[in-house]
Image: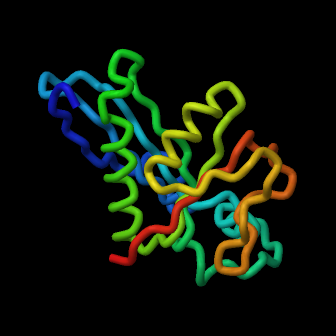
């Protein structure tokens, strides 16, 4: 990394208890924002709470809600790419999620950036699934919504126990 960055956790600002988002930002010593990362509960976990609120019988995910996290995004300013900012954000995100009890982190890679992004995740120990390959059922459960669009590639990593 050509310069130091400070990574700070932001207060969860969206989705409240349903999403339990972990939001991080990376800033240079002079305060310039150079990257962000957000992970949250998996879509099926959020659907669990929405079903409860609507009085519908939910699929029982209660025991696993916080064991699986969904990587919403990792974004880095274009001028700061390939400097280690994304790796630092992802490492801190994994540490924070593991401390909260998460055991798996998964996300999707879009078509436009699939080759470079998949390589980034693979280099960091994530499993990169082939296009069209389904995400495995972590803890015997499905973690994506059946009607949701599939990404170009799924990526996932098992997190160490803290």
**Image spot of residue 19 (x, y percent):** 55, 57
Question: Left of 125 or right of it: where is 35?
Answer: left
Near-viewer residue (92 or 15)? 92
Q: Is residue 72 above or below residue 40?
A: above
Q: In which image quadrant can residue 1 be found?
A: top left
Q: Is residue 36 above or below residue 150?
A: above
Q: Is residue 51 above or below residue 156?
A: below
How many numbered discs? 0
Near-viewer residue (20 or 54)? 20
* Applied colour scheme: rainbow
**Image spot of residue 32 (x, y percent):** 24, 22
| Residue for point 25% across, 45% down | 8
Q: In which image quadrant can residue 86 be found?
A: top left
| Residue for point 32% across, 26% down | 34
Q: In which image quadrant can residue 98 be found?
A: bottom left
Q: Residue lying furthest right in this view?
A: 147
**Image spot of residue 161 (x, y percent):** 38, 77
Question: Left of 120 or right of it: where is 63?
Answer: right
| Residue for point 47% across, 54% down | 21
Question: Left of 134 or right of it: where is 124?
Answer: left
**Image spot of residue 2 (x, y percent):** 19, 25
Q: Locate the C terminus by quadrant.
A: bottom left
């Amino acid at each position: 990394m050509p310069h130091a960055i400070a990574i700070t956790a932001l207060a969860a600002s969206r989705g409240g208890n349903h999403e339990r988002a972990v939001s991080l930002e990376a800033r240079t010593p002079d305060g310039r924002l150079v990257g962000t990362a957000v992970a949250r509960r998996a879509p099926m976990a959020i659907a669990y709470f929405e079903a409860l609120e609507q009085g519908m019988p939910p699929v029982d995910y209660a025991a696993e809600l916080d064991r699986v996290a969904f990587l919403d995004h990792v974004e880095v300013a274009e001028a700061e790419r390939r400097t280690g900012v994304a790796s630092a954000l992802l490492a801190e995100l994994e540490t924070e999620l593991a401390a909260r009890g998460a055991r798996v982190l998964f996300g999707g890679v879009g078509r436009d950036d699939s080759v470079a992004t998949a390589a980034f995740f693979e280099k960091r120990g994530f499993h990169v699934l082939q296009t069209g390959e389904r995400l495995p059922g972590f803890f015997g459960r499905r973690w994506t919504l059946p009607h949701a669009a599939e990404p170009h590639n799924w990526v996932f990593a098992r997190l160490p126990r803290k």
